[in-house]
Image (spheres, grey):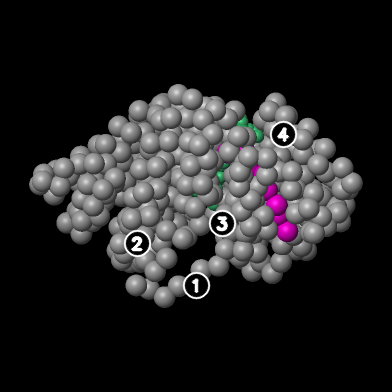
Amino acid sequence: MRNFEYHTPTRLIFGKGVVEKLPEVLGALGNKVLFAYGGGSIRKNGLYARVTELLKGFDVTELSGIEPNPKYSTSVLDGVRLCKEKGIEVILAVGGGSVLDCSKAIAAGALYDGEPWDLITYKVPTKAALPVVDIMTMAATGSEYDSGGVISRTETNDKVGYMDPHLFPVASFIDPTYTFTVPNRQTAAGVADAMNHIYEQYFNAEPNDLADGMMEAALKSLMKNVKIVLEAPGNYDARAEIFLNCSLACNGIYSLGEADSGWPMHAIEHALSAYYDITHGIGLAIITPRWMSHVLNEQTLGRFVRYGVNVMGISPELPRHTIAKQSIEATYRFFESIGIPMHLAEVGIDESRLREMAHHVAVNEGLDGKWVYAPLTEADILTILKNSL
Ligand code: NZQ
Ligand code: ZN
């Protein structure tokens, strides 16, 4: 097992009605609040009104309209400007991963005198950030329990992951009832995202039984509970189990002591959503079985066999190659069964820019490194993209 350090300073406040504690948590961090949210879902479900009520007594500045796949040139820069102009002391992000990711970038940019893009691209180290508190309304990214955010820059087709310990939220309020209104397509995409976060850790060269067991249980729990909520969106326990799964899946706790994987499917998907602004979880579900098929070989076979038997319930009596192939087929069928379009063509992506995207990923993501679990050249990336059409 490899050496590691693990520290998550975020306070998770989970369950029905927990948002009532908001004034107490925010009050300890400051009075001048940037209240950041997305395109209006929180107005429709009443959360905007409740939060506004709870913020009485605070000096509140609003930043609305943060887009899915949050954009640097609009939302991040607007937020940084507002923080500086108003002397903001704490950011309250209310929404999905996009609102929170954007808020994290704003938090760092607000305490930096130069161009915030330099922080996001690690040209300049992040030395400080405003405290961020969030109220999550989507179960998906795990941004509520990690130190990262993903920011898109449309002009250059970049979608960049930005991680730094300063970006851990101080506190995350997770009330699964807020996810009752998430449309089925988005619920399925969120679960696909969390499952992929697990795959990105499960497929590594130095696994251990504890991590494997946690991840296999998490995958089974997600697969079971998403079926329940797609039929019954108001099933609290199923929503809660999905949410807890999502919060844990991107935090690193599942891969303690293990080897790196390189997160190849995320690297490829980020190009898809940078170039075509598609939903992250849907892009991942499309890429996943194609990546799996592409990297299946004698070296990776053992991981696929274990996954097939322990997660997908395939008979251990079958030949090992058959188990591996069936596990990939079962993964594809599962995503299809929860309503995810499984071809790029169905989300508006044709062949025309595949080469450009493969090149962009190869140049920017370094997936051919020896440390990557299954290294990918530009040609490999292109093949995976073509097979996803
Ligand atoms: O903008 P509003 O009106 O709020 O609507 C949102 C948005 O249209 C809607 N929504 C959110 N909560 C809702 C709701 N609709 C009805 N009821 C609710 N309760 O859902 C839409 C999608 O929201 P978004 O925040 O974009 O979704 P998600 O949480 O999946 O976040 C996706 C972003 O996170 C990044 C992705 O790349 C993408 O940019 N990621 C962040 C990660 C991280 N921070 O660690 C890791 C991930 O791998 C991922 O890359
Ligand atoms: Zn993801």
Q: Give residue 199's position: percent from left, percent from top.
A: 37, 50
Task: Report the residue at 78% width, 32% height from top.
Answer: 49
Q: CA distance from mark 1 to mark 2?
A: 17 Å
Q: From this view, report whether residue 254 is shown above or below residue 232.
A: below
Residue type, numbered disc 1 = Glu
Q: Which is in the foreground here, disc 3 or disc 2?
A: 2
Earlier in the chain: of badge 3 and badge 2, it is: 3
- Which residue does the numbered mark 4 point to in the structure image? 47
Say if mark 4 contacts mark 3, CB within 8 Å.
no
Q: Determine if the C-beta at disc 4 is less than 8 A from ligand 1.
A: yes
Q: Give residue 186's position: percent from left, percent from top.
A: 52, 32
Q: CA distance from mark 3 to mark 2?
A: 21 Å
Earlier in the chain: of badge 4 and badge 3, it is: 4
Q: Residue furthest bottom?
A: 3
Earlier in the chain: of badge 1 and badge 4, it is: 1
80 on left or right of 377? right
Q: CA distance from mark 4 to mark 2?
A: 39 Å
**Does the segment drawn in magenta span residue 385?**
no
Q: CA distance from mark 3 to mark 1?
A: 14 Å
Which mark is on residue 5? 1
Q: Give residue 198's position: percent from left, percent from top.
A: 40, 51
**Pick the front one: 316 or 66:** 316
Task: Report the residue at 47% width, 56% height from top.
Answer: 364
**Pick the front one: 315 or 387:** 315
Residues in magenta? 131-138
Q: Which is in the foreground here, disc 1 or disc 2?
A: 2
303 on left or right of 219? left
Q: Determine if the C-beta at disc 3 is less than 8 A from ligand 1.
A: yes
Image quadrant holding the C terminus, namely top left
Q: From this view, report whether residue 337 is shown above or below residue 5.
A: above
- Which residue does the numbered mark 3 point to in the structure image? 146
